[in-house]
Every structure is written in C-alpha cells, then in structure tokens.
Amino acid sequence: MTTILADGWLITMNPARDVLEAASVCVEKDRIVAIGTRDKLARAHPQAEIVDCGGRIVMPGMVNTHTHLFQTLLKGLGDDMALKEWFSCMTGPSAVHLTTEDAKVAALHGCIESLRSGVTTLVDFNYVHTRPGMAEATIEAFEETGIRGFVCRGFMTCGEAYGVPGVLIETPSQALAGARALIEKQNRTPGRVRAGIAPCMIWTVEEEALRLARQLADETGALLTTHVAETSFEIEEANRRYGRTDTEFLSDISFLGPDVLAVHCVQCRSRDIRVLRHHDVKVSHNPCSNLYLGSGIPPIPEMLASGITVGLGSDGPASSNNHSLFQAMKFAALLQKGAHRDPTILTAEKAIEMATIDGAHAVGLGNEIGSIEPGKKADIIVIDASGPSMTPIHNPVSALVYSALGNEVTDVMVDGRFAMRGGAILGVLDTAISAAAQTHADALARRAGSDRFRRRGWRSVAI
C-alpha cells in the first residue's frame, strides 16, 4: 500500500532540521520513500492514496523513553507523596494485587492514550511479575494497538526493609531467567515489539543481579534500562552500601555502556555526568514525574552540553498521571528556564528533538525512526493546528511545544499503517477499553486498600 500525506507543514527532524511548508510525504509499505510536492509525488505514484494534510502539522512520531503501563490503573492514588512513601504505601501494595487481566487492560489503555497524544514508540519498564504472563500481556497490548516499543523485563531482588513487598522480590537467577526467556521469544527476529532488561534501582537490586543483567545484555543485544539517581535516598543508600554514588558504582562494576538507558538522573552531579558521558549512556528525562514526586530538577543542560543523548519520558501514570509527551516537552523546557533564570537554556527546538530523534537514539533506533527521511520507518503523526490553543501560528515548533494541549493529534502511522485515523483508533475499541480500565482500577484499588487515598480531606456526596 502506498500513501501520500499531502500539503502539510512538515517538521522533518532531519540533520538540517528542515521545516517545510506545503510539503508531502510518500509512504510505501513500512517506509518513507520520498518527500516533495503533492503533484510530483502523485505523478510518481499514481496508485497512491492521497491524504489531505493541508493546514496540519506532519512530524515524526514521538518516542516515550520511560513508563510503567500497569500504573495506568493507579492514576491519582499517589498524589502529594514523596517517592519512598508513594512506593511503599500505594504503588507496591497495588502491584501485589495486580492480575494479568489488569496488566493487559492497563497496557491497552496506556497504549491508546499514547497513540492519541502522538507517541509511536513506548518503553515499558515492566517490573511486576507476581503472576506468570505479566510481560506477555503487555506485549499483546502493543501488538493489538499497533504501537512500536520495548517491553523491558524489570525485577527487584531486595528492598523489603524499605517497603518493597516480599512477593515482588525475585532471586537474581529467577529474574534473569525470566528476562532471557522473554528476549529469546520476542527478539528472535526483527519486529515492532522487542524485549529489554530492566533492573529496578540501586536499593532494590543486588550487585550480582546487576552483573548478570549486564552479561545478558552483552549476549543478546537487548536494551538495558534502570532508574538512576532519582532521589537523594538513592544517593544516600549507594554511599552507605558502596561508598560512592549509584552512577559511580554502576561504572565500577562495568554495568554502564552505550546500550544503557538511565532513567531520571535527577541527583547526578558533574562527576556523575562525566561518568555517563564516558560510557555513552543515554538518559530518559521525566520532568512531570520528577516534579510530581518532588524529586528535584535534573541537570539536563549540563548533560546536553557534555554531549549526552537525552530523550523524554512520561514515567508511569501513578507519578505523572498521563502519557503525554506534549506535557513533557513543555515542562522540560520551562523547568530549566525557571531554575536557571535563563529563557534560552532549553529551547522549543531542543525539546522537540528530545521527544523525537534524540529519543530514537536513546533506545537504539535512531537509524530507523525519529525523523521523516526517505528510507526510514514510516512512524508519522498528523496534528490539527487549527484550534484556538495553537492559533495563530508564527512558528510550528513553538506552537507544538508551548501551545498544544496534546489532544490535537488526528492521525498516527506506525510502520506505514494507520493506528489512528481521523481521530479514531483502529484495531481495538477504545471506548470499551476505557470503561474496562475504570472497572479494573476500582477493583484493584479496593483489593490493595489504596482507594483510601482517593479523597483525602474531601467528601463525595451523591445527589
């Protein structure tokens, strides 16, 4: 099938960062084959379906480098808590009661929400394995919705003293066997949905498990991701255990490398940044979550100045409350402007790079996705720019980062196929999934006892 997305305002994210007016993109099968005028492409491809994108913005699909899809069912339950309390009092207990059906519904809802806000690639940090089939349920959701991404098999091997429920803790051999099995099944041949490895964080994973994870990544080429320096507690715990920061410790045990996606890095200081750059580690910046949990403001400008690749993430909806990278772009830019009192320190152009081509490089797919160029995969989104929030437009990049609400996406193409068209999700019934998510969320909160956090200090009165 050949499709021409015609006459849009095209944000290419190519090396020159060209922004083209009234430009058209030709897609054949799963690849972008040409960029030009409507007439030129139509003459070259007379059988192509032409989709009129006049007055709309066409850009690469965004890459969400970090989330926890099961937390879709926990939105709003962890408000106004520091991370340690948030995990030990709400997220951990809820995870204990999660079923595979919960995980599937949550992942379907999260994938749909992501597609609707222009995300075509998603990295799920999948650390709940209290029952068989949790990761497989999430993979099924990716396949059914048509989104691209990584389901990274997460694990914790310690941490009960800090509030990690015992049933979430695995032995290193159990955890790595589970990761290996998932990788061997999912990564046997190239595909849209791949498996990765995700040791959780310094205070929940033993050194042996980290070394085994590194070894498995070396053997299989799988993406390796972990939380790094998210709060001061991680730094304190790393210093107590190892006499150095978690970044320094991970370097010393040869865990770090160009295939590692380090999430958060809020508490990283100049020496840690030098360590990350030395190993060519990629960083996932989650500004909304870092603010929601009061974790702090990461030194993103210093990382960028050092040459570190930084992508954007939403984090799980229990600590950011949605999967919108539009919000992440805006917060990423504004946060640094305010913290440094410098409006030039992180621009709209850089924010959109982080959400697209930099995110693609962060997950090892920079040669395949993240920009609109002939030969690349056709992961493309179309945005209706005619609404009052975005108009009038002088600069489409500025409008996307600072003005868009995130609900302006009308069409989403992944691998050359429409996953959403004309505002309608294809392949799954999203209204039914939304209803199911509410049902599952209510039941999970009751089982876990976390429903008591819903209305602290407020009354809900039936009329």
Image (cartoon, helix red, strand yellow):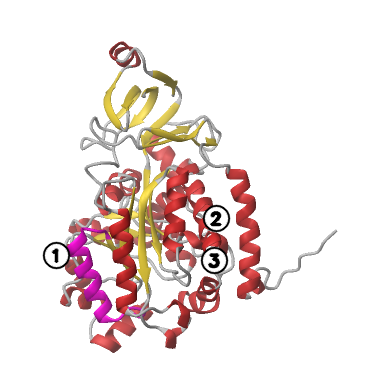
SS category of the residue bearing label 2: helix
* Quadrant housing residue 437: bottom right
Q: CA distance from mark 2 to mark 1?
A: 41 Å
Q: Earlier in the sequence, mark 2 or mark 1?
A: 2
Magenta stretch: give its range.
203-223
* Quadrant housing residue 127: bottom left
Q: Earlier in the sequence, mark 3 or mark 2?
A: 3
- Quadrant where the N terminus sits is top left
The extreme right residue here reads 463
Q: Is residue 211 left or right of residue 316?
A: left
* Quadrant housing residue 260: bottom left
Residue 395: in sight, yes or no?
A: no
Q: CA distance from mark 3 to mark 1?
A: 41 Å
List the residue tagged with mark 2.
105
Q: Position of residue 290 (x, y in %)?
A: 42, 65
Q: Residue at x 45, y 56 (%)?
A: 138
Amino acid type of the residue tagged 2 in the rendering:
Val
List the residue tagged with mark 1.
278
Q: Main secondary structure of the magenta part?
A: helix
Amino acid type of the residue tagged 3 in the rendering:
Thr
Q: CA distance from mark 3 to mark 2?
A: 10 Å
Q: Position of residue 172 (x, y in %)?
A: 31, 78
List the residue tagged with mark 3.
99
Amino acid type of the residue tagged 1 in the rendering:
His
